[in-house]
Image (spheres, helix red, strand yellow):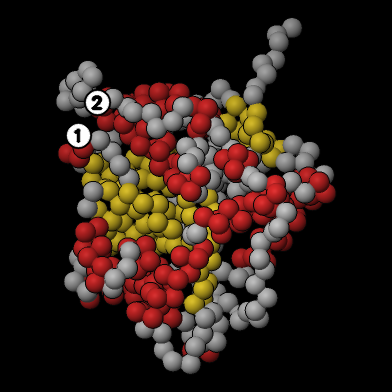
């Protein structure tokens, strides 16, 4: 009798646990990274680039399994199949009845894309994986240009460090006992978008490409950073789009925070937290300058190391509660869905800046730009930059595009050249 191979397994990190329980056909918990090249993609060479990339990121060979109490990752011998794009944007990756990898590699004309189920990694970890895939693709695609030893792939961390569960490593039980400070102030109703949804659970994408330098200059004109400026601008256009009858509703934007710089982590898995930035209703109109001031104050408070540490330890304490750990997985799924739906009602939208994507300067002649976007149960923004190309991506489940028009119109009125593209 042939001996069955035993596979290694690993627990899901704290941030990952919510995604398998709360994904659905509309909100697949999948995000996409895309690189637009100067030349058309060579499928065969892209396939060759996958194996060395997976050697550096073995966690990407994992499949998601269901245990009695928790989901877990199990290693596999599966290899992704490079496909020309044919599915809708951020189509489901995890199907409970299947045993598949949690990412896919796609191409279309001059674009290479990787779609990833959020339980596997966050944006920062996925970009690191994507940069490695592109390194192997470009050095193979242009082998005559990149002669032997001309470029080397510098590892940012050992494989063991990439596999780290950084939530577990940074958890301080004594700190978590104190719990997070609860805000007892009476909250206003939160404004939430409504509209006619796109058919077949498809996600509408509208993105603007512009000069990173020009946006930085505009942000500096308002004496702030690019992230705070664009977050404030998003508040500003939501105020314009919001019906007057809902003027007493507050607006809450969720902003993901990469935790790696705070805890010197090099994990390729999830390691992020989400902070909520709130714009409360007031009698007089909010000016953009006023919004920037209140957003800056909240960023300073929410992104202090002490506040972040307290928040992360609190989340870990909830996970390690003995009673919670003993709840069977089907009941956990139901509990997490209900808790997520309640939490979701307190959020208007989200904006995420995944930052600057770095590639060897020798690759500049072959790369045009990058973009990042996510499946959407509500309108939301993701932005990234490469060289002087900033791409701001709006994804939405709704047909209406007034919000996007207001956002990009503000920038063009300020003299920013914006190239608009979309998928529908």
Position of residue 316 in the picture relative to residue 388 (left or right): right
Quadrant in the picture for residue 226:
bottom left
Q: Nearer the viewer, residue 36 or 256?
A: 256
Q: What percent of the width, then of the height, locates residue 270?
A: 54, 44
Q: Quadrant of the C terminus?
A: bottom left
Looking at the rendered structure, which numbered label has been put on residue 69?
none
Q: Which residue is mark 1?
A: 362
Q: What percent of the width, then of the height, locates residue 273?
A: 54, 54
Residue at 74% in and 36% down: 67
Secondary-structure class at tag 1: helix
Position of residue 297 in the picture relative to residue 407 (left or right): right
Secondary-structure class at tag 2: loop
Quadrant in the picture for residue 204:
bottom left
Q: Residue furthest top?
A: 1
Residue 240 visible to the viewer: no
Residue at 66% in and 36% down: 11
Q: CA distance from mark 1 to mark 2?
A: 9 Å
Residue 323 visible to the viewer: yes
Q: Nearer the viewer, residue 75 or 11?
A: 11
Circle 1 packing at 10 Å, graded few (<14), some (14-19), many (20+), is few
Circle 2 packing at 10 Å, graded few (<14), some (14-19), many (20+), is few
Residue at 65% in and 72% down: 183
Give the answer, above or below, for where 362 lies relative to 349. above
Mark before the other along the chain sequence, 1 or 2: 2
Q: What percent of the width, then of the height, locates residue 64?
A: 63, 36
Q: Nearer the viewer, residue 339 or 286?
A: 286
Cβ–Cβ under 8 Å for marks 1 and 2: yes
Q: Nearer the viewer, residue 351 or 294?
A: 294
Q: Which residue is mark 2?
A: 151
């Amino acid at each position: 009798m042939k001996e069955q191979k035993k596979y290694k397994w690993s627990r899901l990190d704290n941030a990952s646990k919510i995604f398998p329980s709360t994904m659905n056909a509309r909100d697949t918990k999948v995000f996409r990274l895309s690189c637009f090249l100067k030349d058309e993609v060579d499928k065969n060479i892209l396939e060759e680039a996958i194996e060395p990339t997976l050697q550096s990121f073995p966690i990407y060979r994992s499949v998601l399994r269901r245990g009695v109490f928790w989901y877990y990752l199990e290693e596999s011998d599966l290899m992704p199949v490079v496909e020309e794009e044919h599915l809708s944007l951020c189509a489901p990756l995890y199907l409970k009845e299947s045993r598949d990898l949690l990412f896919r590699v796609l191409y279309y004309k001059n674009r290479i894309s990787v779609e990833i189920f959020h339980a596997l990694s966050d944006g920062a970890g996925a970009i690191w994986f994507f940069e490695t895939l592109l390194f192997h693709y470009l050095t193979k695609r242009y082998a005559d240009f990149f002669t032997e030893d001309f470029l080397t792939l510098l590892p940012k961390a050992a494989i063991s460090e990439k596999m780290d569960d950084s939530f577990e490593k940074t958890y301080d039980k004594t700190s978590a006992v104190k719990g997070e400070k609860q805000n007892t102030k009476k909250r206003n109703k939160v404004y939430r978008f409504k509209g006619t949804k796109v058919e077949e659970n498809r996600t509408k994408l509208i993105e603007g490409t512009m000069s990173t330098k020009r946006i930085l200059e505009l942000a500096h004109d308002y004496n702030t950073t690019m992230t705070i400026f664009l977050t404030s601008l998003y508040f500003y256009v939501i105020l314009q789009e919001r019906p007057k009858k809902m003027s007493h509703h507050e607006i809450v934007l969720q902003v993901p925070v990469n935790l790696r710089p705070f805890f010197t982590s090099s994990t390729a898995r999830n390691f992020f937290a989400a902070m909520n930035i709130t714009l409360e209703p007031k009698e007089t109109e909010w000016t953009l300058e006023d919004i920037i001031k209140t957003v800056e104050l909240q960023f300073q408070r929410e992104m202090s190391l002490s506040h972040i540490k307290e928040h992360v330890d609190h989340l870990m304490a909830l996970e390690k509660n003995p009673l919670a750990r003993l709840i069977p997985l089907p009941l956990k799924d139901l509990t997490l869905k209900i808790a997520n739906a309640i939490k979701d009602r307190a959020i208007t939208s989200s904006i995420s800046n995944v930052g600057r994507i770095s590639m060897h300067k020798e690759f500049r002649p072959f790369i045009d730009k990058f973009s990042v976007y996510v499946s959407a149960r509500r309108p939301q923004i993701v932005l990234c930059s490469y060289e002087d190309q900033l791409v701001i991506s709006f994804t939405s489940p709704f047909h209406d595009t007034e919000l996007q028009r207001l956002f990009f119109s503000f920038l063009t009125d300020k003299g920013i050249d914006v190239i608009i593209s979309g998928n529908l």
